[in-house]
Amino acid sequence: MIINDYLPKVSIIIPTYNRLELLIKAIDSAFAQTYSNIEIIVVNDNTDKLLNKQLKQLLQPYIINKNFVFIQHKTNKGGSAARNTGINYATGSFITFLDDDDYYVPKRIEIMMQYMLENDSTYDAIISSMQRIDENGTLINIDENIARGTDFKSFALDGNIYTGMILMKKEFIEKIGGFSNIPRFQDKLLMLKFFKMGGKVLILKDKLHFMLEHMKDRVTYKNPVKGRLSHKIIYNYIKKNKHLFSKNEWQHIKYKYYYGLSSVSAQGSLYDRLLCFWFSLKALSYYKKTRLSMAKLYFRCITTAKFSNKVKRIMKIN
């Protein structure tokens, strides 16, 4: 346990959009933190008047708490803008995030701040790992639960950092301009910017929050066009630093780019699935290991997203 006369404040930012019941569980997990000096900032990006009325009623027990802040967007701006709004309102020296369908373990912030306070001059962010569960509470154990990536190159090649894993100094997240306005994978672009600006991280294997995998897909995940656009933006950002990579490493970057395009296209219409096959062929031309991953991706191209997701869990397809 941290023993200190002064604990720096940590701001927990929770963007939300039409997940009333799940949001309450997320907020409760934030209030249950053993680290005492926190503020919880909920940013509602939903503009539906009826739902917002229900939300305000549900939040009444929290609004009276001096450590709770509720912000209502007048127009729908998206997840990046909602998180940036939270950052702008935050009064903490450190910023961390929680999606409205996820929840923390009670000692999450205490554990992460212990490392931060012991190494304050060394690290700009502490990154924890996570656990996934399905709607029945069953654990989903896959490699993507573990945080990876300690610099720009390693993160671009094989990085794995989700928004809920991050605790970052406020001054540094402001230095890199917060979240960029892209439809998906905002966390990946944030961390690429972080590393490009020389940010230093400590990666923890401790699984300190739960990500819920549910049949009601996360916001924008059903839109292949947004997914392809986001992959392109991230690829172009990495491409500006192509000189950092060897020839083989750059081939891997190209493989990941086309594999990503294929993967998001597998969730769409017949046209999108035709694109899925095309991008799969492009990815295959850059892939130097086994063809098994591509076979799995072809399977995803020809099945419905719902059926494919079930099979993914059974086969543990990444």
Image (cartoon, grey):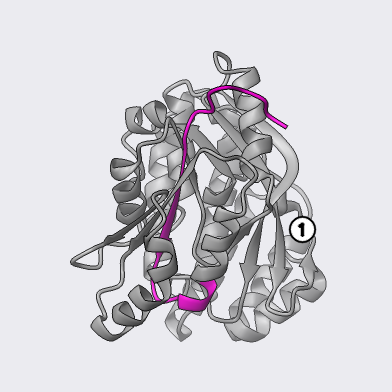
For residue 101, side relative to residue 140 (left or right): left
Quadrant in the picture for residue 300: bottom right
Residue 160, percent across and down? 62, 45
For residue 217, side relative to residue 32 (left or right): left
Q: Residue at x 59, y 77 (%)?
A: 301
For residue 86, side relative to residue 293 (left or right): left
Quadrant in the picture for residue 211: bottom right
Q: Residue at x 79, y 67 (%)?
A: 139
Residue 225, percent across and down? 37, 69
Residue span colored magenta: 1-22
Q: Is residue 182 above or below residue 23?
A: above
Quadrant of the frame with the C terminus: bottom right
Q: Is residue 70 magenta?
A: no
Residue 74, percent across and down? 18, 66
Q: Which residue is mark 1?
A: 142
Q: Amino acid at mark 1?
A: Ile
Quadrant of the frame with the N terminus: top right
Q: Is residue 202 above or below residue 267?
A: above
Which of 54/15 is in front? 54
Numbered disc 1: secondary structure? loop
Q: Residue at x 71, y 36 (%)?
A: 204
Q: Is residue 140 above or below residue 129?
A: below
Residue 76 visible to an observer of this rendering: yes
Residue 303 visible to an observer of this rendering: no
Q: Residue at x 57, y 27 (%)?
A: 151
Q: Is residue 6 magenta?
A: yes
